[in-house]
Amino acid sequence: MSKKHSNFEEVAKAIKEAGSIVLFPHVNPDGDAIGSSVALLLAVRKLGKKCTILVDEPVQSNLAFLDKGYLSVKSDEENHDLSIAVDCGETFRFEKRQDCFFKGKKTLCIDHHKTSVPFCDYNLIDPARAATAELIFYVIEALGADMDKEIAEAIYTGILTDTGSFRYSNTTGDSHRIVSRLYEHNIDSNRICVEIYENISESKMALSAISLGKMEIFAGGKGAISYVDRAMLKETGALMSDSEGITEDMRKISGVEISALLKEYDNNEIKVSMRAKSIGDVSTIGAKYGGGGHVKAAGCTLHMNMEKALKIMKKEIEENLNSYGI
Amino acid sequence: MSKKHSNFEEVAKAIKEAGSIVLFPHVNPDGDAIGSSVALLLAVRKLGKKCTILVDEPVQSNLAFLDKGYLSVKSDEENHDLSIAVDCGETFRFEKRQDCFFKGKKTLCIDHHKTSVPFCDYNLIDPARAATAELIFYVIEALGADMDKEIAEAIYTGILTDTGSFRYSNTTGDSHRIVSRLYEHNIDSNRICVEIYENISESKMALSAISLGKMEIFAGGKGAISYVDRAMLKETGALMSDSEGITEDMRKISGVEISALLKEYDNNEIKVSMRAKSIGDVSTIGAKYGGGGHVKAAGCTLHMNMEKALKIMKKEIEENLNSYGI
């Protein structure tokens, strides 16, 4: 079965032909997955279609403002016309909902991830896009559905979060051009930014403060390393997932080229999260220890105690930096 | 002497008539003041004009990338044709350079601050603009000077920093529209974001970690308060100015409506920095103690020890929140 890429018009046609649609964002959905799904749901409902968004679990608290009863955690057993994978280009990213997905009479994938391999009847996949929400913007345009404030705010959320507030290198002139058009619908961008970025739990903030307080700068100021152990979680009431962002915070230090956070999941199970700034390639360190990732963001798991793991990672980072002559 | 507002064409005409121009950004210049000045300097030099930017002191390190020898700390004694106040609408914001400013045969002010009162021969002042850099974009267009990558990156820096990476409520559709046009000149937005936001000193990061570790949440989770004392500065090697941003960080906590940071400048000299999120008005607290500011950002100075100051501020914040029935 050959799977081909579709353009906006073909996708709009497929959507128009469907009376009932189920949307499938990826597991642990982020702002782009939820924002894109909500925008698309609202647009197709305007065209008189039945639509629901099927998820594995309720959305994280700082995205809850987008869900006005649109998300369903129950498997949709109806024989719907069209299944759309939103912001996920591989079936393992919505594994538990796969059965329901392929019950759709037709399938469509709208995604911007590099790894996406066409697996649907229709595939709108563009890795040059900063966010799937950018594709949704043009899909809605092709559908001829009226844009309104709520749709525009959902699309804005997707672009905002996937570009890291327009800071990441995936941001393009078109990302800004689309957003400027969303403002025409009176989006309250500041309120959304508060929801997204000023919604950190007290325990997460406390964990971050403790971990950054333990940070060590090494390799002549070019390396930064710290850790989160189970005692810190107990002290702050935080979850290990609350350690997200600490590695990026360390990279923000002037002169630091590689940062690493070591997370104690269990005795002798230390998960390492690494980031590189301009030079250096943390994916090679990740791969050496059975992990992987990208040049600027990678990870691995070490089976040893924290003290030993910190020592090894410092050595690896120092060697990595040296190999670039820095 | 009546001072009137000028439009882009009048400003362009005034600039075109000048052979030599000196630009005056405000003291402690931020990304918008420097970005706007550098962009304007490069554009008018393209038109064959002599131009320099006069500042009081070298620019802060995370803006140094913009200055390729354009900034001068020496008073320019020549009898120049045009003085331009950039991003500052009041003479006290460039007090030490006032004499040189008024030596210019003509004067021009380009600014977006609300408090700006026309004081020049030509005044281009628009408080609806998120950044002076937006005005500079249109001035350059009106001048007919060729935009290039370096000019576009300087304008981008101004808009980026004054909108808080496009998150503040001053951001408009036109902010994004202008930025989308800057991308046409191949700006390296990611590199600029790294320069601006990933250039924090190790001591500033350490100070932030200690201060956030001392944070207390009160008023049923709606208030957050912490402090920076001189012992913390000694321990981290940080300056008091490195405490900037901690108040905003505390406001980021879910549920927190008002945050306050108390800074010990001297024995019995505690400077208070406050922020409000959605509700609450910290300007009234500031004013009550002889300070002031805006509804969402205000401050004051207390003449007492830290312990007492923390107690008083907690009480004030609690009462302020109560007055809004929250």
Image (tube, coloured by chain):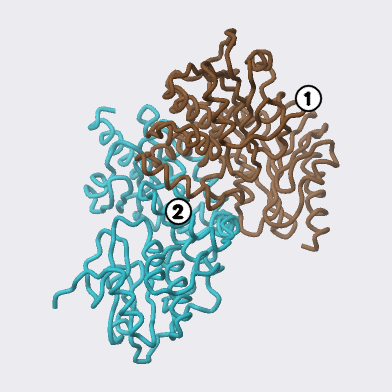
Chain colours: A cyan, B brown
* For residue B144, above or below residue A193: above
Considering the numbered disc 1 on the image, is that residue within a helix, a strand or a loop?
A: loop
- Given residues A14 and A166, the one toward you in this image is A14
In the rendered view of the protein, which quadrant contains the N terminus of chain B? top right
Residue B218 x/y as whole percent: 72, 54
Left or right of residue B247, residue A86 in this image: left
Left or right of residue B64, residue B6 in this image: right
Q: Residues within 10 Å of mark 2 (few under 14, many from 20)?
A: some
Q: Say which chain tag 1 marks.
A: B
* For residue B318, above or below residue B59: below
Residues at badges 1 and 2 in contact (C-beta under 8 Å)? no
- Given residues B306 and B103, the one toward you in this image is B103
Left or right of residue B150, residue A202 in this image: right
Which residue is tagged 1? Answer: B1
Which residue is tagged 2? Answer: A244
Q: Residues within 10 Å of mark 1 (few under 14, many from 20)?
A: few
Left or right of residue B111, residue A293 in this image: left
Q: Amino acid at mark 1?
A: Met
Residue B78 x/y as whole percent: 57, 8
* For residue B56, above or below residue A75: above
Q: Nearer the viewer, mark 1 or mark 2?
A: 1
